[in-house]
Image (cartoon, rainbow, N blue to C red):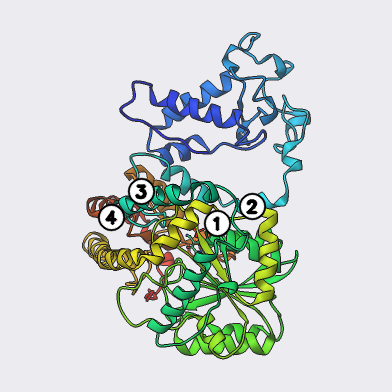
Amino acid sequence: MHVVIERTSPTPIYLQISQQLRQSILDGEPPSGAKLPPERRLAKLLGVNRTTIVNAYRELAADGLISGQVGRGTVVIFGARDADAAADVTAWPRVNGQHPLDNGASTLDGDFNDGSTRSRQSSVPWAQLFTAVTDVMDDPLLRDAMTVSARPDVIRLATGIPAPELYPIDAIRQIFDQALDNAGSTLLQHTPTEGYPPLREQLAGWMERQAAIAGASVVVEPNQIVVVAGSQQGLYLLARTLIDPGDLVAVESPTYLGAAQVFRAAGARLMPIPIDGDGMQVDLLQDLLPRRRPKLIYTLPTFQNPSGTVMAMGRRLRLLDLAARYQIPVIEDDPYGALRYDGRALPTLATIDRAEGRGNVIYLSTVSKMLFPGFRIGWISGVKPVIEQVTLMKQLVDLDTNALAQRAVCAFFERGLLDEHLALVNRVYPQRRDRMLEALRQRAGDLISANRPDGGIYLWCRLNEGIRVRDLLPEAAREGVIFAPGESFHVDAASGRGRFDIRLNFTLPNDSELDEGIRRLSVAIQRLADRLDPAAHASATRPLTPIV
Ligand code: PMP
Protein backbone atom coordinates (compact mmCIF):
# COMPACT_ATOMS: atom_id res chain seq x y z
CA MET A 1 0.00 0.00 0.00
CA HIS A 2 1.71 3.16 -1.17
CA VAL A 3 0.44 6.67 -0.55
CA VAL A 4 2.10 9.63 -2.17
CA ILE A 5 1.20 13.10 -0.99
CA GLU A 6 1.54 16.05 -3.33
CA ARG A 7 1.70 19.02 -1.00
CA THR A 8 1.50 21.55 -3.84
CA SER A 9 -1.63 19.93 -5.31
CA PRO A 10 -4.96 21.80 -5.05
CA THR A 11 -6.60 18.50 -3.93
CA PRO A 12 -6.88 18.45 -0.14
CA ILE A 13 -4.47 15.99 1.45
CA TYR A 14 -7.20 13.90 3.08
CA LEU A 15 -8.74 13.38 -0.37
CA GLN A 16 -5.37 12.50 -1.91
CA ILE A 17 -4.97 9.85 0.76
CA SER A 18 -8.49 8.50 0.49
CA GLN A 19 -8.34 8.41 -3.30
CA GLN A 20 -5.11 6.41 -3.31
CA LEU A 21 -6.26 4.04 -0.61
CA ARG A 22 -9.53 3.63 -2.45
CA GLN A 23 -7.70 2.64 -5.64
CA SER A 24 -5.50 0.19 -3.75
CA ILE A 25 -8.53 -1.42 -2.12
CA LEU A 26 -10.28 -1.69 -5.48
CA ASP A 27 -7.14 -3.35 -6.81
CA GLY A 28 -7.38 -5.90 -4.03
CA GLU A 29 -4.39 -4.70 -2.02
CA PRO A 30 -4.99 -4.55 0.92
CA PRO A 31 -7.52 -7.37 0.54
CA SER A 32 -10.84 -7.70 2.23
CA GLY A 33 -10.36 -8.45 5.91
CA ALA A 34 -6.99 -6.68 6.11
CA LYS A 35 -6.50 -4.09 8.82
CA LEU A 36 -5.52 -0.55 7.89
CA PRO A 37 -2.92 1.12 10.11
CA PRO A 38 -4.34 2.93 13.14
CA GLU A 39 -5.05 6.58 12.38
CA ARG A 40 -2.35 7.90 14.68
CA ARG A 41 0.30 5.62 13.20
CA LEU A 42 -0.54 6.35 9.58
CA ALA A 43 -0.58 10.07 10.39
CA LYS A 44 2.95 9.81 11.74
CA LEU A 45 4.14 7.74 8.81
CA LEU A 46 2.73 10.15 6.26
CA GLY A 47 3.74 13.24 8.20
CA VAL A 48 0.18 14.63 8.47
CA ASN A 49 -2.29 15.43 11.26
CA ARG A 50 -4.40 12.67 12.69
CA THR A 51 -7.58 14.51 11.63
CA THR A 52 -6.43 14.25 8.03
CA ILE A 53 -6.39 10.46 8.34
CA VAL A 54 -9.70 10.44 10.23
CA ASN A 55 -11.25 12.38 7.34
CA ALA A 56 -9.64 10.11 4.74
CA TYR A 57 -10.94 6.98 6.50
CA ARG A 58 -14.39 8.58 6.73
CA GLU A 59 -14.43 8.97 2.96
CA LEU A 60 -13.55 5.30 2.51
CA ALA A 61 -16.15 4.21 5.06
CA ALA A 62 -18.78 6.27 3.24
CA ASP A 63 -17.83 4.40 0.06
CA GLY A 64 -18.42 1.08 1.80
CA LEU A 65 -14.77 0.10 1.47
CA ILE A 66 -13.73 0.04 5.10
CA SER A 67 -15.33 -0.24 8.47
CA GLY A 68 -14.15 0.86 11.89
CA GLN A 69 -14.80 -1.52 14.74
CA VAL A 70 -14.18 -1.15 18.40
CA GLY A 71 -11.32 -3.41 19.40
CA ARG A 72 -10.44 -4.44 15.86
CA GLY A 73 -9.40 -1.19 14.27
CA THR A 74 -10.19 -0.21 10.72
CA VAL A 75 -10.79 -3.16 8.42
CA VAL A 76 -11.15 -3.41 4.65
CA ILE A 77 -14.58 -4.80 3.81
CA PHE A 78 -14.34 -4.69 0.06
CA GLY A 79 -13.02 -7.70 -1.90
CA ALA A 80 -10.74 -7.51 -4.93
CA ARG A 81 -13.21 -9.54 -6.98
CA ASP A 82 -15.61 -6.63 -7.05
CA ALA A 83 -13.19 -4.14 -8.46
CA ASP A 84 -14.57 -4.31 -11.99
CA ALA A 85 -18.16 -4.09 -10.96
CA ALA A 86 -17.42 -1.17 -8.70
CA ALA A 87 -15.25 0.99 -10.88
CA ASP A 88 -17.03 3.92 -9.33
CA VAL A 89 -18.07 2.95 -5.84
CA THR A 90 -19.20 6.41 -4.97
CA ALA A 91 -21.88 6.14 -7.61
CA TRP A 92 -23.37 3.06 -6.04
CA PRO A 93 -26.88 3.44 -4.74
CA ARG A 94 -27.02 3.95 -1.03
CA VAL A 95 -29.77 3.47 1.48
CA ASN A 96 -29.55 6.03 4.24
CA GLY A 97 -25.90 6.39 3.54
CA GLN A 98 -25.37 2.67 3.91
CA HIS A 99 -23.96 0.38 1.29
CA PRO A 100 -26.77 -1.75 -0.23
CA LEU A 101 -24.73 -4.93 0.16
CA ASP A 102 -24.38 -4.31 3.87
CA ASN A 103 -27.63 -6.16 4.51
CA GLY A 104 -28.40 -3.59 7.11
CA ALA A 105 -25.45 -4.36 9.32
CA SER A 106 -23.39 -1.33 10.22
CA THR A 107 -20.24 -3.23 11.15
CA LEU A 108 -18.70 -6.51 10.11
CA ASP A 109 -19.91 -9.34 12.18
CA GLY A 110 -21.20 -12.90 11.89
CA ASP A 111 -19.76 -14.49 8.78
CA PHE A 112 -17.32 -11.71 8.26
CA ASN A 113 -15.76 -11.12 11.59
CA ASP A 114 -12.84 -13.48 11.15
CA GLY A 115 -11.11 -10.68 9.34
CA SER A 116 -9.49 -12.86 6.75
CA THR A 117 -11.78 -15.24 4.99
CA ARG A 118 -14.67 -13.57 3.25
CA SER A 119 -15.62 -10.20 2.08
CA ARG A 120 -19.12 -8.94 2.02
CA GLN A 121 -18.99 -8.46 -1.73
CA SER A 122 -16.92 -11.41 -2.93
CA SER A 123 -18.01 -14.99 -2.66
CA VAL A 124 -14.40 -16.11 -3.09
CA PRO A 125 -12.46 -16.44 0.17
CA TRP A 126 -9.34 -14.79 -1.23
CA ALA A 127 -7.31 -14.74 1.93
CA GLN A 128 -7.70 -18.52 2.24
CA LEU A 129 -6.60 -19.12 -1.32
CA PHE A 130 -3.28 -17.32 -1.31
CA THR A 131 -0.27 -19.54 -0.80
CA ALA A 132 1.68 -19.29 2.42
CA VAL A 133 4.49 -17.66 0.45
CA THR A 134 3.08 -14.15 0.89
CA ASP A 135 3.18 -14.56 4.69
CA VAL A 136 6.98 -14.49 4.67
CA MET A 137 6.87 -10.97 3.29
CA ASP A 138 4.83 -9.71 6.20
CA ASP A 139 7.16 -7.44 8.14
CA PRO A 140 5.11 -4.55 9.56
CA LEU A 141 8.17 -2.44 10.32
CA LEU A 142 9.46 -2.81 6.78
CA ARG A 143 6.01 -2.11 5.38
CA ASP A 144 5.91 1.12 7.36
CA ALA A 145 9.35 2.04 6.04
CA MET A 146 8.19 1.39 2.48
CA THR A 147 5.07 3.50 2.97
CA VAL A 148 7.16 6.39 4.19
CA SER A 149 9.70 5.85 1.41
CA ALA A 150 7.02 6.53 -1.21
CA ARG A 151 6.44 10.07 0.06
CA PRO A 152 8.00 12.63 -2.32
CA ASP A 153 9.08 14.89 0.55
CA VAL A 154 11.05 12.12 2.23
CA ILE A 155 14.82 11.73 1.96
CA ARG A 156 15.47 8.05 1.35
CA LEU A 157 18.37 6.59 3.23
CA ALA A 158 16.74 3.17 3.29
CA THR A 159 17.18 1.94 -0.25
CA GLY A 160 20.41 0.48 -1.63
CA ILE A 161 20.59 2.25 -4.95
CA PRO A 162 23.71 3.61 -6.69
CA ALA A 163 24.00 7.38 -7.28
CA PRO A 164 21.55 8.16 -10.13
CA GLU A 165 23.36 11.30 -11.27
CA LEU A 166 26.36 9.11 -12.14
CA TYR A 167 24.49 6.66 -14.38
CA PRO A 168 26.29 6.58 -17.75
CA ILE A 169 23.20 7.44 -19.75
CA ASP A 170 24.91 8.69 -22.92
CA ALA A 171 26.95 5.50 -23.20
CA ILE A 172 23.80 3.42 -22.77
CA ARG A 173 21.96 5.37 -25.44
CA GLN A 174 24.83 4.85 -27.85
CA ILE A 175 25.06 1.14 -27.09
CA PHE A 176 21.33 0.63 -27.58
CA ASP A 177 21.33 2.57 -30.86
CA GLN A 178 24.26 0.59 -32.20
CA ALA A 179 22.87 -2.74 -31.04
CA LEU A 180 19.46 -2.07 -32.58
CA ASP A 181 21.03 -0.84 -35.84
CA ASN A 182 23.37 -3.82 -36.14
CA ALA A 183 21.28 -6.66 -34.83
CA GLY A 184 17.78 -5.36 -34.07
CA SER A 185 15.88 -8.31 -35.52
CA THR A 186 17.88 -10.98 -33.70
CA LEU A 187 18.19 -8.94 -30.55
CA LEU A 188 14.47 -8.77 -30.10
CA GLN A 189 14.11 -12.54 -30.17
CA HIS A 190 15.03 -15.02 -27.44
CA THR A 191 18.54 -15.69 -26.21
CA PRO A 192 19.69 -19.03 -24.76
CA THR A 193 18.33 -19.60 -21.24
CA GLU A 194 21.88 -19.65 -19.84
CA GLY A 195 22.48 -16.18 -21.24
CA TYR A 196 23.86 -14.33 -24.25
CA PRO A 197 27.08 -16.26 -24.99
CA PRO A 198 29.43 -13.23 -25.33
CA LEU A 199 28.15 -11.91 -22.00
CA ARG A 200 28.84 -15.25 -20.33
CA GLU A 201 32.40 -14.98 -21.68
CA GLN A 202 32.77 -11.46 -20.34
CA LEU A 203 31.45 -12.46 -16.92
CA ALA A 204 33.82 -15.42 -16.72
CA GLY A 205 36.72 -13.10 -17.64
CA TRP A 206 35.57 -10.55 -15.05
CA MET A 207 35.61 -13.19 -12.32
CA GLU A 208 39.11 -14.21 -13.32
CA ARG A 209 40.29 -10.57 -13.25
CA GLN A 210 38.70 -9.96 -9.87
CA ALA A 211 40.50 -13.03 -8.56
CA ALA A 212 43.78 -11.67 -9.92
CA ILE A 213 43.18 -8.30 -8.20
CA ALA A 214 42.88 -10.26 -4.95
CA GLY A 215 46.17 -12.01 -5.69
CA ALA A 216 44.60 -15.35 -6.66
CA SER A 217 44.44 -17.26 -9.88
CA VAL A 218 41.45 -19.18 -11.14
CA VAL A 219 39.96 -20.31 -14.42
CA VAL A 220 36.27 -19.63 -14.96
CA GLU A 221 34.63 -21.13 -18.02
CA PRO A 222 31.67 -19.36 -19.69
CA ASN A 223 29.68 -22.58 -19.32
CA GLN A 224 29.98 -22.19 -15.53
CA ILE A 225 27.80 -19.07 -15.75
CA VAL A 226 24.04 -18.49 -16.02
CA VAL A 227 22.81 -14.95 -16.58
CA VAL A 228 19.78 -14.15 -14.41
CA ALA A 229 17.33 -11.27 -14.09
CA GLY A 230 19.14 -9.68 -11.14
CA SER A 231 20.72 -11.63 -8.33
CA GLN A 232 17.34 -11.62 -6.61
CA GLN A 233 16.17 -13.98 -9.32
CA GLY A 234 19.38 -15.92 -8.84
CA LEU A 235 18.50 -16.41 -5.18
CA TYR A 236 15.01 -17.47 -6.11
CA LEU A 237 16.25 -20.00 -8.67
CA LEU A 238 18.78 -21.41 -6.22
CA ALA A 239 16.16 -21.70 -3.52
CA ARG A 240 13.78 -23.50 -5.84
CA THR A 241 16.58 -25.76 -7.02
CA LEU A 242 18.09 -26.67 -3.67
CA ILE A 243 15.53 -26.22 -0.92
CA ASP A 244 12.73 -28.59 0.00
CA PRO A 245 10.18 -27.53 2.62
CA GLY A 246 11.63 -28.04 6.09
CA ASP A 247 15.27 -27.82 5.01
CA LEU A 248 17.58 -25.87 7.26
CA VAL A 249 19.61 -22.99 5.81
CA ALA A 250 22.41 -21.32 7.75
CA VAL A 251 22.40 -17.55 7.28
CA GLU A 252 24.34 -14.72 8.87
CA SER A 253 22.64 -12.68 11.54
CA PRO A 254 21.94 -10.00 10.39
CA THR A 255 21.60 -10.96 6.74
CA TYR A 256 20.16 -9.69 3.45
CA LEU A 257 16.43 -9.77 4.03
CA GLY A 258 15.59 -10.43 0.37
CA ALA A 259 17.45 -13.74 0.61
CA ALA A 260 15.85 -14.71 3.92
CA GLN A 261 12.42 -14.09 2.40
CA VAL A 262 13.19 -16.21 -0.66
CA PHE A 263 14.50 -19.10 1.45
CA ARG A 264 11.50 -18.95 3.73
CA ALA A 265 9.16 -18.82 0.77
CA ALA A 266 10.72 -22.10 -0.41
CA GLY A 267 9.85 -23.60 2.98
CA ALA A 268 13.29 -23.36 4.59
CA ARG A 269 13.89 -22.98 8.30
CA LEU A 270 16.66 -20.49 8.91
CA MET A 271 19.56 -20.99 11.29
CA PRO A 272 21.09 -17.60 12.21
CA ILE A 273 24.84 -17.44 12.77
CA PRO A 274 25.89 -14.15 14.39
CA ILE A 275 28.53 -11.98 12.77
CA ASP A 276 31.17 -9.79 14.37
CA GLY A 277 33.71 -7.38 12.89
CA ASP A 278 35.30 -10.25 10.93
CA GLY A 279 32.08 -11.53 9.38
CA MET A 280 30.25 -14.76 10.14
CA GLN A 281 31.41 -16.35 13.40
CA VAL A 282 32.45 -19.57 11.78
CA ASP A 283 33.33 -21.21 15.10
CA LEU A 284 29.66 -20.96 16.11
CA LEU A 285 28.66 -22.56 12.83
CA GLN A 286 31.23 -25.28 13.44
CA ASP A 287 29.68 -26.04 16.84
CA LEU A 288 26.24 -26.38 15.32
CA LEU A 289 27.09 -28.46 12.28
CA PRO A 290 27.37 -31.90 13.91
CA ARG A 291 23.96 -31.51 15.58
CA ARG A 292 22.07 -29.53 13.00
CA ARG A 293 23.03 -30.30 9.45
CA PRO A 294 21.95 -27.37 7.28
CA LYS A 295 21.28 -28.11 3.63
CA LEU A 296 22.91 -24.84 2.61
CA ILE A 297 25.06 -22.04 3.95
CA TYR A 298 24.26 -18.54 2.66
CA THR A 299 26.88 -15.85 3.22
CA LEU A 300 27.82 -12.33 2.13
CA PRO A 301 31.55 -12.35 2.89
CA THR A 302 32.42 -9.02 1.26
CA PHE A 303 30.81 -5.77 2.45
CA GLN A 304 27.97 -7.64 3.99
CA ASN A 305 24.44 -6.29 3.65
CA PRO A 306 23.53 -4.72 6.05
CA SER A 307 26.63 -4.57 8.27
CA GLY A 308 29.37 -3.79 5.72
CA THR A 309 31.71 -6.33 7.33
CA VAL A 310 34.26 -8.38 5.42
CA MET A 311 34.84 -11.99 6.38
CA ALA A 312 38.46 -12.40 7.45
CA MET A 313 40.70 -14.67 5.35
CA GLY A 314 41.11 -17.24 8.12
CA ARG A 315 37.36 -17.57 8.44
CA ARG A 316 36.96 -17.91 4.68
CA LEU A 317 39.32 -20.86 4.72
CA ARG A 318 37.64 -22.46 7.73
CA LEU A 319 34.18 -22.02 6.30
CA LEU A 320 35.27 -23.71 3.09
CA ASP A 321 36.89 -26.55 5.05
CA LEU A 322 33.69 -27.09 6.99
CA ALA A 323 31.59 -27.00 3.83
CA ALA A 324 33.85 -29.62 2.27
CA ARG A 325 33.96 -31.80 5.39
CA TYR A 326 30.19 -31.79 5.89
CA GLN A 327 29.42 -31.66 2.14
CA ILE A 328 27.28 -28.57 2.41
CA PRO A 329 27.07 -26.13 -0.50
CA VAL A 330 27.83 -22.47 0.15
CA ILE A 331 26.00 -19.67 -1.65
CA GLU A 332 28.28 -16.65 -1.81
CA ASP A 333 26.30 -13.48 -2.55
CA ASP A 334 28.67 -10.76 -3.75
CA PRO A 335 26.98 -7.66 -5.18
CA TYR A 336 29.35 -5.19 -3.52
CA GLY A 337 32.83 -6.72 -3.91
CA ALA A 338 33.94 -4.30 -6.65
CA LEU A 339 32.83 -1.24 -4.62
CA ARG A 340 36.01 -1.12 -2.55
CA TYR A 341 37.41 2.18 -1.28
CA ASP A 342 40.05 1.11 1.23
CA GLY A 343 42.10 -1.93 2.07
CA ARG A 344 43.12 -4.89 0.00
CA ALA A 345 40.68 -7.21 -1.75
CA LEU A 346 40.44 -10.76 -0.44
CA PRO A 347 39.73 -13.60 -2.86
CA THR A 348 36.10 -14.64 -3.00
CA LEU A 349 35.05 -17.96 -1.48
CA ALA A 350 34.35 -19.19 -5.02
CA THR A 351 37.89 -18.33 -6.11
CA ILE A 352 39.52 -20.10 -3.17
CA ASP A 353 37.23 -23.09 -3.53
CA ARG A 354 37.91 -23.47 -7.24
CA ALA A 355 41.62 -22.86 -6.91
CA GLU A 356 41.65 -25.88 -4.59
CA GLY A 357 39.84 -27.92 -7.23
CA ARG A 358 36.53 -28.08 -5.40
CA GLY A 359 33.11 -27.01 -6.59
CA ASN A 360 31.24 -26.39 -3.35
CA VAL A 361 30.57 -22.67 -3.74
CA ILE A 362 27.80 -21.19 -5.83
CA TYR A 363 28.71 -17.60 -6.58
CA LEU A 364 26.14 -14.89 -7.20
CA SER A 365 26.67 -11.33 -8.35
CA THR A 366 24.94 -8.51 -10.19
CA VAL A 367 25.53 -5.24 -12.01
CA SER A 368 22.79 -3.59 -9.90
CA LYS A 369 25.15 -1.97 -7.41
CA MET A 370 28.18 -1.45 -9.66
CA LEU A 371 26.11 0.22 -12.39
CA PHE A 372 22.38 0.52 -11.67
CA PRO A 373 19.54 -1.91 -10.92
CA GLY A 374 17.28 -1.16 -13.91
CA PHE A 375 18.88 -3.59 -16.37
CA ARG A 376 18.07 -6.49 -14.02
CA ILE A 377 21.22 -8.39 -14.94
CA GLY A 378 22.99 -10.66 -12.50
CA TRP A 379 24.70 -14.01 -12.75
CA ILE A 380 25.25 -17.31 -11.01
CA SER A 381 28.49 -19.21 -11.33
CA GLY A 382 28.89 -22.80 -10.22
CA VAL A 383 29.80 -26.30 -11.29
CA LYS A 384 28.06 -27.95 -14.24
CA PRO A 385 25.29 -29.83 -12.38
CA VAL A 386 24.27 -26.64 -10.60
CA ILE A 387 24.27 -24.60 -13.80
CA GLU A 388 22.15 -27.25 -15.54
CA GLN A 389 19.54 -27.41 -12.80
CA VAL A 390 19.33 -23.65 -12.43
CA THR A 391 18.91 -23.34 -16.18
CA LEU A 392 16.00 -25.78 -16.13
CA MET A 393 14.43 -23.84 -13.30
CA LYS A 394 14.93 -20.57 -15.16
CA GLN A 395 13.11 -22.02 -18.14
CA LEU A 396 10.09 -22.43 -15.91
CA VAL A 397 10.33 -18.91 -14.61
CA ASP A 398 11.05 -16.68 -17.61
CA LEU A 399 12.73 -18.65 -20.42
CA ASP A 400 15.62 -16.21 -20.74
CA THR A 401 16.90 -12.84 -19.56
CA ASN A 402 16.17 -9.60 -21.43
CA ALA A 403 18.35 -9.73 -24.56
CA LEU A 404 18.78 -5.99 -25.04
CA ALA A 405 19.92 -5.50 -21.46
CA GLN A 406 22.36 -8.43 -21.80
CA ARG A 407 23.85 -6.85 -24.93
CA ALA A 408 24.23 -3.52 -23.22
CA VAL A 409 25.92 -5.00 -20.17
CA CYS A 410 28.15 -7.07 -22.45
CA ALA A 411 29.22 -3.88 -24.27
CA PHE A 412 30.02 -2.27 -20.93
CA PHE A 413 32.42 -5.08 -20.14
CA GLU A 414 33.89 -5.33 -23.67
CA ARG A 415 34.59 -1.61 -24.01
CA GLY A 416 36.05 -1.18 -20.56
CA LEU A 417 33.13 1.10 -19.61
CA LEU A 418 32.38 -0.82 -16.44
CA ASP A 419 35.94 -0.35 -15.22
CA GLU A 420 35.72 3.37 -16.03
CA HIS A 421 32.43 3.65 -14.19
CA LEU A 422 33.77 1.78 -11.19
CA ALA A 423 36.77 4.10 -11.06
CA LEU A 424 34.33 7.03 -10.89
CA VAL A 425 31.98 5.64 -8.23
CA ASN A 426 34.87 4.33 -6.17
CA ARG A 427 36.12 7.93 -5.99
CA VAL A 428 32.73 9.47 -5.15
CA TYR A 429 31.24 6.92 -2.74
CA PRO A 430 33.93 7.04 -0.04
CA GLN A 431 33.49 10.83 0.04
CA ARG A 432 29.77 10.33 0.66
CA ARG A 433 30.47 7.66 3.27
CA ASP A 434 32.76 10.01 5.14
CA ARG A 435 30.40 12.95 4.72
CA MET A 436 27.58 10.93 6.25
CA LEU A 437 29.79 9.73 9.08
CA GLU A 438 30.93 13.25 9.82
CA ALA A 439 27.36 14.61 9.71
CA LEU A 440 26.25 11.87 12.11
CA ARG A 441 29.16 12.55 14.41
CA GLN A 442 28.52 16.29 14.50
CA ARG A 443 24.76 16.15 14.89
CA ALA A 444 24.14 13.04 16.94
CA GLY A 445 27.53 11.68 17.87
CA ASP A 446 26.52 10.93 21.43
CA LEU A 447 23.34 9.14 20.40
CA ILE A 448 24.38 6.92 17.53
CA SER A 449 27.52 5.06 16.53
CA ALA A 450 28.33 3.78 13.07
CA ASN A 451 30.88 1.60 11.37
CA ARG A 452 33.19 2.88 8.61
CA PRO A 453 33.07 0.15 5.96
CA ASP A 454 35.91 -0.23 3.48
CA GLY A 455 33.37 -0.62 0.68
CA GLY A 456 29.75 -1.21 -0.20
CA ILE A 457 27.00 1.36 0.08
CA TYR A 458 25.72 1.25 3.68
CA LEU A 459 26.50 2.45 7.15
CA TRP A 460 25.31 0.10 9.87
CA CYS A 461 24.53 2.15 12.93
CA ARG A 462 23.59 1.50 16.52
CA LEU A 463 21.37 3.86 18.45
CA ASN A 464 22.46 4.58 21.97
CA GLU A 465 20.51 5.22 25.08
CA GLY A 466 17.87 2.57 24.49
CA ILE A 467 16.33 4.42 21.57
CA ARG A 468 14.28 1.80 19.80
CA VAL A 469 14.06 1.71 16.03
CA ARG A 470 10.31 1.13 16.09
CA ASP A 471 9.88 4.40 17.99
CA LEU A 472 12.35 6.22 15.79
CA LEU A 473 10.71 5.25 12.51
CA PRO A 474 7.51 7.31 12.97
CA GLU A 475 9.53 10.23 14.37
CA ALA A 476 11.87 10.12 11.38
CA ALA A 477 8.88 9.87 9.05
CA ARG A 478 7.49 13.02 10.62
CA GLU A 479 10.78 14.79 9.96
CA GLY A 480 10.83 13.47 6.38
CA VAL A 481 13.61 10.90 6.35
CA ILE A 482 13.60 7.11 6.21
CA PHE A 483 16.16 4.40 6.97
CA ALA A 484 16.14 0.59 6.94
CA PRO A 485 15.16 -0.86 10.34
CA GLY A 486 17.72 -3.26 11.81
CA GLU A 487 15.19 -5.81 13.06
CA SER A 488 14.17 -6.61 9.49
CA PHE A 489 17.63 -8.05 8.81
CA HIS A 490 17.36 -10.59 11.59
CA VAL A 491 15.64 -13.89 10.95
CA ASP A 492 14.89 -14.57 14.61
CA ALA A 493 12.49 -11.67 15.09
CA ALA A 494 11.53 -12.69 18.61
CA SER A 495 15.16 -12.34 19.75
CA GLY A 496 14.87 -8.57 19.67
CA ARG A 497 18.15 -8.36 17.78
CA GLY A 498 18.46 -5.26 15.63
CA ARG A 499 16.08 -3.28 17.85
CA PHE A 500 18.68 -0.53 18.17
CA ASP A 501 20.26 -0.81 14.72
CA ILE A 502 19.56 1.04 11.51
CA ARG A 503 21.03 0.80 8.04
CA LEU A 504 21.75 4.01 6.14
CA ASN A 505 22.53 4.13 2.42
CA PHE A 506 25.02 6.81 1.42
CA THR A 507 24.94 6.48 -2.38
CA LEU A 508 21.40 7.40 -3.41
CA PRO A 509 21.29 10.83 -1.72
CA ASN A 510 23.44 13.59 -3.22
CA ASP A 511 25.50 15.79 -0.91
CA SER A 512 22.74 18.20 0.06
CA GLU A 513 20.13 15.44 0.52
CA LEU A 514 22.62 13.55 2.60
CA ASP A 515 23.27 16.55 4.88
CA GLU A 516 19.59 17.31 5.19
CA GLY A 517 18.71 13.64 5.69
CA ILE A 518 21.12 13.32 8.59
CA ARG A 519 19.92 16.62 10.05
CA ARG A 520 16.32 15.34 10.03
CA LEU A 521 17.32 11.97 11.40
CA SER A 522 19.28 13.60 14.19
CA VAL A 523 16.31 15.79 15.15
CA ALA A 524 14.17 12.66 15.39
CA ILE A 525 16.76 10.79 17.44
CA GLN A 526 17.29 13.75 19.72
CA ARG A 527 13.55 14.13 20.29
CA LEU A 528 13.27 10.48 21.34
CA ALA A 529 16.32 10.75 23.57
CA ASP A 530 14.82 13.83 25.27
CA ARG A 531 11.60 11.98 25.85
CA LEU A 532 13.18 8.94 27.45
CA ASP A 533 12.04 8.47 30.99
CA PRO A 534 15.25 8.40 33.08
CA ALA A 535 14.23 5.11 34.79
CA ALA A 536 13.46 3.39 31.49
CA HIS A 537 16.53 4.99 30.10
CA ALA A 538 18.73 3.49 32.78
CA SER A 539 17.35 0.00 32.23
CA ALA A 540 17.40 0.31 28.46
CA THR A 541 20.93 1.58 28.21
CA ARG A 542 23.22 -1.24 27.25
CA PRO A 543 26.95 -1.38 27.07
CA LEU A 544 27.97 -0.08 23.70
CA THR A 545 29.40 -2.71 21.45
CA PRO A 546 31.21 -0.97 18.65
CA ILE A 547 30.13 -2.17 15.25
CA VAL A 548 33.22 -2.31 13.13
N1 PMP B 1 21.85 -9.74 -2.77
C1 PMP B 1 22.15 -8.71 -1.97
C2 PMP B 1 23.07 -8.93 -0.83
C3 PMP B 1 21.61 -7.45 -2.19
O1 PMP B 1 21.94 -6.45 -1.35
C4 PMP B 1 20.74 -7.26 -3.27
C5 PMP B 1 20.11 -5.93 -3.56
N2 PMP B 1 19.84 -5.15 -2.48
C6 PMP B 1 20.46 -8.36 -4.09
C7 PMP B 1 21.03 -9.57 -3.81
C8 PMP B 1 19.53 -8.24 -5.27
O2 PMP B 1 20.07 -7.44 -6.27
P1 PMP B 1 19.58 -7.45 -7.77
O3 PMP B 1 18.41 -8.38 -7.89
O4 PMP B 1 19.22 -6.04 -8.09
O5 PMP B 1 20.72 -7.93 -8.58
Q: Which residue is mark 1?
A: 229
Residue 288, by quadrant, is: bottom right
Mark 3 vs mark 1: in front:
3
Q: Residue furthest front?
A: 182
The local crowd at label 3, few if under 14, some if 14 to 19, many if 20 or more residues have their Cα within 10 Å, is few
Q: What amino acid is at disc 2?
A: Asp
Question: Which label's residue is closer to the chain start, 2 or 4?
Answer: 2
Measured Cα–Cα span from mark 3 to mark 2: 26 Å
Disc 1/disc 4 C-alpha distance (Å): 34 Å
Which residue is the site of mark 3? 173
> Comparing marks 3 and 2, which lies closer to the viewer?
3
Where does residue 166 sit, x and y in percent of width and height?
29, 55
Q: CA distance from mark 3 to mark 1?
A: 21 Å
Whether residue 375 is visible: yes
Residue 125: image x %, image y %? 76, 35
- Left or right: residue 39 versus residue 98 is left
Query: On the image, numbered disc 2 is attached to which residue?
Result: 398
Q: Horizontal placement of 132 versus 411: left or right?
A: right
Q: Does mark 2's beta carbon lie closer than 8 Å to ligand 1?
A: no
Q: Is residue 32 above or below residue 163?
A: above
Could you tell which of marks 1 and 2 lies nearer the N-terminus? 1
* Mark 2 vs mark 4, CA separation in Å: 41 Å
Secondary structure state at the residue bearing disc 4: helix
Residue 464 visible to an observer of this rendering: no
Residue bearing mark 4: 518
Kind of residue sitting beneath label 3: Arg
Residue 247 appears in which quarter of the rendering?
bottom right
Q: Evaluate if marks 1 and 4 touch, with contact meaning CB atoms under 8 Å apart.
A: no
**Label 2: element kind:** loop
Q: Is mark 1 within 8 Å of ligand 1?
A: yes
Residue 10 sits above or below residue 366 on the image: above
